[in-house]
Image (cartoon, helix red, strand yellow):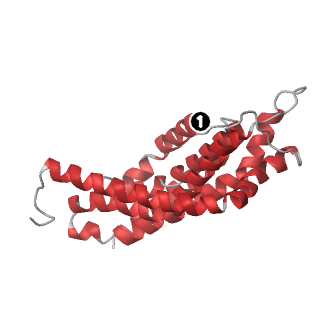
Amino acid sequence: MTDDQPRPVLEHLEELRWRIVKISIAVAVGATVAFVFRGWLFDVLTRPYQIALGDDALNQFQVTEGFSVAMRLSLFGGLVLASPVVFYQIWAFVNPALTKRERRWTIPIVTALVVLFTAGVVFGYYILPRGLEFLLGIQPGLNSMIGASDYFSVTLRFLLVFGVAFEFPVFLFAAAAVGLVGSDQLKRGRRWAILIIVVVGAVVTPTGDPLTLTALSVPLYLLYEITIWLVKLILRR
């Protein structure tokens, strides 16, 4: 059976299962590497907290909190390290449904997914101290005694939200590549794009403060405009 012929549902499910297995193995290997360097990862991710509050140390309120934090850091690091494999396996699962012309975009799109995800995480990391300062200083008279588990729960979700949000233009470009939208439609949809970006940003950002929402919305809209330009320039050729 060739890739261009219909395939049974059970065969699709079997392929999906093996894709998930490969993703899980890649994340597990990455998490093992991250666990070895969890001390360095801890220092890097607590830097925004130190910038926001000075040199205050995080607190441990439960016996198992240190273990929980180590596992979260390892899983987060493993996901970032395994992101090339994760995105490739997702794209490879969709690939048989595409035409030969559309399959030419495999390497560029997977590369763009990895680069933009990493860029989103890095951008979120540098924005994080401002968000923490806003949240921790919004109510005067309170003493901050932040638990490590609570801090990393907010921080890691914050970084992942930025990483996933930055993938937005890739899906727009992919939709244009398969003919679902065009540059003219994207231009006419600017107002809707702004509304969707702001609403989704307000819902998904863990901190929810105006500064973080603005910091997420502005680059996403700029990426939207860049996507329009790329669709018009590249796909027209």
Q: Left or right of 91: which side holds 218?
A: right
Q: Quadrant of residue 184?
A: bottom left
Q: Residue at x 21, y 70 (%)?
A: 100
Point out residue 98 in the picture as x, y percentages from the top left corner: 23, 61
Q: Is residue 214 visible?
A: no
From this view, report whether residue 95 is shown above or below residue 221: below
From this view, report whether residue 154 is shown above or below residue 38: above
Q: Left or right of 17: which side holds 6?
A: left
Q: Left or right of 170: which side holds 1?
A: left
Point out residue 42 in the picture as x, y percentages from the top left corner: 72, 54
Kind of residue indicated by mark 1: Ala
**Residue annotated with mark 1:** 202
Q: Residue at x 72, y 58 (%)?
A: 39
Point out residue 34 in the picture as x, y percentages from the top left corner: 60, 60
Point out residue 82 in the picture as x, y percentages from the top left corner: 49, 62
> Looking at the figure, which quarter contains the N terminus?
bottom left
Q: Residue at x 47, y 40 (%)?
A: 192
Q: Left or right of 128: which side holds 142?
A: right
Q: Residue 166 versus residue 56: which sits nearer the camera?
A: 56
Q: Residue 152 versus residue 48: which sits nearer the camera?
A: 152
Q: Residue at x 56, y 46 (%)?
A: 161
